[in-house]
Amino acid sequence: MSAARAGAIPANAFATRLLALAAILTLAVLSQLHGGGLYSARVLSALYGLVISGFFLALAYGALAAWRPFRSLHVVELAGDALLISGFVYCTGGARSIFGFLYLIWIVYAALTLGSRGAMSACSFATVALAVIAWGPLAGWFQPFTPEFAMGAHEAGTALGTHAAAFMAVALLARRLAVEVQVGRDELQELGELHRRIVDNVSSGLLTVTRAGAISSFNQESERITGFKASEVVGRPLAELFPTLGALDVVERMRRIQLEYRDRGGHTLHLGMSLSWLRNAAGENDGAILIFQDLTHLVEMEEQLRKSERLGAIGQLAAGLAHEIRNPLASLSGAVELLAADLPAADRHSQTLSQIVQRETARLNRLVTDFLTYARPAPGRSEAVPLRALFDELAELVARDASLGIRVDVAIPDSLEALGNGDQLRQVFWNLVRNAAESEPVDRTVRVRGSREDAWVHLEIEDRGCGMAPETLERIFEPFYTTKPKGTGLGLATVHRVVEAHGGRISLESELGRGTKVRVSLRAAP
């Protein structure tokens, strides 16, 4: 009755059945007109009734397929078609009916839906059904539909033999066709699966867009980068996924672009994109393919490199300046001490001035020492530094400082160890913890978290304090840049230099009024 793919009801099955039923009705009407009243009113009524039944059967098949598809739905469909065809044949002349050819179409359909076994089973059923229709009246099982359709044994045997041979020939051909169709379908499925695997394993995000600008495909890397599933974006306009991208014609003029993108989790990414048009056989634009990569890590590395170069130049200047200051400073400090020793004890004014000079000289010496630490933060000795013990010690120091009134919440595994200089790392984390404490977090708690990933140790120091503005965050590691009234601006600059000297990385995330999170990555101890 209709053609379909094996294993699934075709989407246009209902329309195909309607066309088949319309063709049957048209054939019956033409036969009636050109045959001079070939069928009686009774036959025509039965014929029309069967056509209407076929229409309702098509509706039932479609409803079953849409409501709850199941594996044996084709068997139900073929059984209903067999009864309908047998009804057409019985009501319009039995073995001599012009609708006997419907069995041939039904056998082909059985082969395409159920394979070789379906073709042979359909052939057997059609032969048995036609034999019953032809020999039933002769054997007295039932009467012919109308008396004029009665036939003799010789005519019935000849018609049955002819039809059986035709059924067998068509079944064998349909069986061969079913095998070829199945092989082609398997190859097509394998090609489709290979294409899907290739696209999904591409290391770049890849999506295709229709000419109207709607997303038509979305690979796994695209899902990872954007945070959206393919089912959520396919069919939606490209401008909804990438609002800053603009229309396709704009991208076409630019070809390769780099833009900032905020993913589903709210993280800002730097994406590099390349667009190519998809052209049809006529050479016309039929959509586009957009390939994009997450360049955030590269952009951050470039920024860190530029910052390191800038800070390195300042460090060299600081080292030279510190050496030039330290030598005369030592002489000045020694001279003042000698002068103070020669001053009379009763000369209070001179003694006070001498103490001021010595105190400021000592402060200047500490500043020069900080200069040198910033300029030359080489790790020196390298050892396994137990981070849990280090932070527990820092937490105790902070707890004893009544001026801070802050608690340090440490969540670091006991076995977590970093490779580096213990004294320098202690100074780094002391600076970071104290800065977090001085930001006055709303819950009076500084949180320290630690974890290991492959050969790296990651530490996060987070507060929920005043936070920093973007312009402050941009310059926070520059020497002499500080937001504190009495700060020198060398604390975080030195922290940055020490972490870099250890081969590690440091980054900050901060928002005004929400707090700051510092992330330090160091090489793990083996």
Image (cartoon, rainbow, N blue to C red):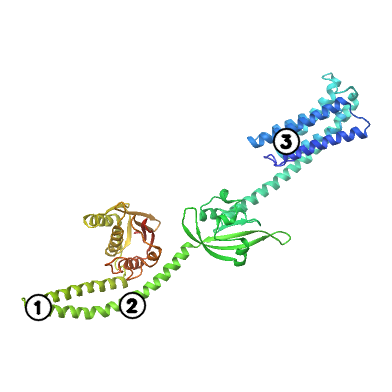
Q: Position of residue 257 (x, y in %)?
A: 56, 65
Q: Residue furthest right?
A: 36
Number of other residues with Cα within 10 Å of mark 2, as a class: few under 14, some 14 to 19, many 20 or more: few
- The residue singled out by tag 1 in the image is 341
* Closer mark to the observer between disc 1 and disc 2: 1
Tell me whether the residue at label 2 lies in contact with that at label 3, contact meaning CB atoms closer than 8 angstroms.
Answer: no
Which kind of residue does numbered mark 2 sit on?
Answer: Leu
- The residue singled out by tag 2 in the image is 317
* Closer mark to the observer between disc 2 and disc 3: 2
Quadrant occupied by the C terminus: bottom left
Q: Secondary structure at mark 1?
A: helix
Quadrant occupied by the N terminus: top right
Tell me whether the residue at label 1 lies in contact with that at label 3, contact meaning CB atoms closer than 8 angstroms.
Answer: no
Compared with residue 20, is residue 428 higher up or lower down, i.e. above or below? below
Q: Quadrant of residue 199?
A: bottom right
**The disc label shown at residue 118, or none:** 3
Q: Position of residue 179 (x, y in %)?
A: 72, 43
